[in-house]
Image: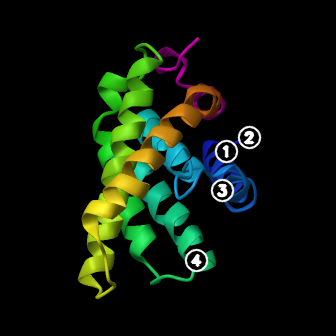
Amino acid sequence: MSRNVRYILVLTIAFICQATIVPFVSIGAARPDIVLIAIATFGFIDGPVAGAVGGFFGGLLQDLVAAGSLGLTALAKTLTGYISGQAERTILGSSLLLPVVVIAGISVISQIIYVGLAFLMGEPVNFGAALRVVVFPSAAYTALVSVPVFPYISRLLSSQRQSKVFK
């Protein structure tokens, strides 16, 4: 199976899980972001361009099913996919803890970008409450979910990049 087909398959499965399973496992306003884990993995494995492209399409899929402004999630995920690609050299081949911490940080960045863009689009935003109730709890939840999900996705996507992936 070609690399691009694997990327599309992983992104599609992550999106389906995000849309069908995540609403049932949310804790209050905190929800894990499985699409973000996939996007971060794209960036970690193939660099900023793969992360940004995956972020755009993953965010666009999420925008299409959400009731909010079209394009906000796509832009936020594109930027965070690019950022995850910048971290690629130091993430893979290290312990499992480092990617989990970076995914938590990327989750915070993604959600802050989204909240900032929503504010700029004229939506009423209480930034302090958003950080306290949604951003930090969701980032922690995403990091927790990434512990089993990240190594699996990275092994699946990088059959030809075995030197960079956890064994």
Q: Amino acid at mark 4?
A: Ala
Q: CA distance from mark 2 to mark 4?
A: 31 Å
Residue 46 lies in the magenta stretch: no
Which residue sits at x=52%, y=41%?
141
Mark 2 Cα within 10 Å, few/some/many (few <14, many 20+)?
Answer: few
Total numbered labels placed on residues in the image: 4
Residue 94 is situated, as x and y percent measured from the top left of the image, at 40, 14
Q: Which badge, 1 or 4, comes first in the chain's sequence?
A: 1
Q: CA distance from mark 2 to mark 1?
A: 7 Å
Residue assigned mark 1: 6
Residue 165 lies in the magenta stretch: yes
Vertical comparison of 84 with 97: above or below: below
Which residue sits at x=42%, y=37%?
103
Vertical comparison of 164 with 13: above or below: above
Residue assigned mark 4: 66
Disc 2 and disc 1 in contact, CB within 8 angstroms: yes
Q: Nearer the viewer, residue 82 or 21?
A: 21
Q: CA distance from mark 4 to mark 3?
A: 12 Å
Residue assigned mark 3: 18
Q: Which badge, 3 or 2, comes first in the chain's sequence?
A: 2
Magenta residues? Answer: 154-167
Q: Nearer the viewer, mark 2 or mark 4?
A: 4
Disc 3 and disc 1 in contact, CB within 8 angstroms: no
Q: Is residue 49 visible?
A: no
Q: CA distance from mark 3 to mark 2?
A: 24 Å
Q: Nearer the viewer, residue 129 or 58?
A: 129
